[in-house]
Amino acid sequence: MDIKILNFETAIHPPTWCEIDLKALAHNFEQLQKLAAKNMSHSLSIMPVIKADAYGHGMIQVAECLSACGCKYWGVSNVSEGVTLRAGEFKQKILLFESTLVSEAKDIVEYKLTPTVCALEMALALDRCAHQAGIQVPVHIKIDTGMGRLGVNEGQALVFVETLMRQCPNLILEGIYTHLPVADTDRDFTLGQMRRFRDIVYSLENQFIAFSYVHAGNSMGLGDYKSELFNLARPGIMIYGIYPLEELKKKVQLKPVMSVKARIIFVQTIAKGRGISYGHTFKAKEDITVAVLSIGYSNGYLRSLSNKAFVLVDGVRCPVVGRVTMDQIIVDITAATLSGRLPKIGDEAVIMGAQKGASVSVDEIAQWADTISYEIICSLGNRLPRLYHS
């Protein structure tokens, strides 16, 4: 197995780290392609979303893996992410979800990025830069059908597109899309969004304005909604082996890509009645054995996990006791000592992932922290050194 250590320069074995399984990533891409083929009677391309440093997994490494899998289109957030991919000599098409500042137009054209357009001022700036460069620039138009964030208001969509056709001859209207904010919680609203978006696309087609790419499906949209209208899907969280809805496990078999591990840096006995960590929010009801792990909120392990979370030590689920501190957590490993072996300094604990048949999932961690899995993997993945398995 090939293991690469990144973002860690001073030691061979960091005390706390993320492991990224690129084989699992490739497996998930293949499975999502099969799901897309099953859900659609026509060809549907997959455009993995690798913004936010690939949700904490490492954008360049994820791009390399997906490129080897034949991926031809990526979605990122902004110009900086797109330029980073171009600096890595990736030639794939790159869609920018967030590109509204006129000052970014020149870089978008220079680096051959595909911007989202939802403001006329930006469209005109892109058109000028494209004219100066002597090229035409593909753009995707975003229609707001219910997200309330970026996008042309659906009631103004037809006029906006017609205006671009008249005033921006150097732009290629390559794609049109919308976003589904409640696909996992409100099916009726989501279906209404899809119908209204469909009507906009059909109205434009009746005026002989057609798009190469029509898309709305994020992970949830790809997994649970079918439409003959769409020919591009934008899976994000599912690429990384995480389900936006439990029921989707029946439709597609994914593998978690990220796990988080730490080495025990200290072991001691805490006597009955003694408090642990800041504020003594936990007091031992009996003599217990605790281990200290070098991970805390500075590493992305949220303070809200205090006295709620579990980690794996020797395959045993052990509770986090006391408040999470900046650099460390304290874990009650008493249950792990019942086998007769006392965990020792240097032993490996699993913060997220599997060990000896037991597991702690990102969804569990998110539930304990009262947040979502997206925040957990972005927080941990962006703040810990990563080891890549390929």
Image (tube, rainbow, N blue to C red):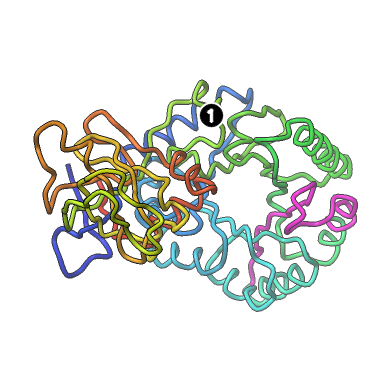
Whether residue 129 is visible, yes or no, is yes
Q: Nearer the viewer, residue 371 or 9?
A: 371
**Residue underneath mark 1:** 246
- The kind of residue on which mark 1 rests is Glu
Residue located at (69% from left, 73% from top): 131
Q: Nearer the viewer, residue 57 or 267?
A: 267
Residue located at (53% from left, 46% from top): 372
How far from the left and from the top, in percent, is residue 15?
20, 58
Q: Is residue 308 found left or right of 122 in the rendered image?
A: left
Location of the N terminus by quadrant is: top left
| Magenta residue check for 140 | yes
- Residue 231 appears in which quarter of the rendering? top right
Q: Residues within 10 Å of mark 1 (few under 14, many from 20)?
A: few
Q: Is residue 200 found left or right of 190 in the rendered image?
A: right
Location of the C terminus by quadrant is: top left
Above or below residue 100? Residue 288 is above
Residues drawn in magenta: 134-160
Residue located at (68% from left, 73% from top): 101
Q: Nearer the viewer, residue 283 or 19?
A: 283
How far from the left and from the top, in percent, is residue 18?
30, 52
Above or below residue 37? Residue 143 is below
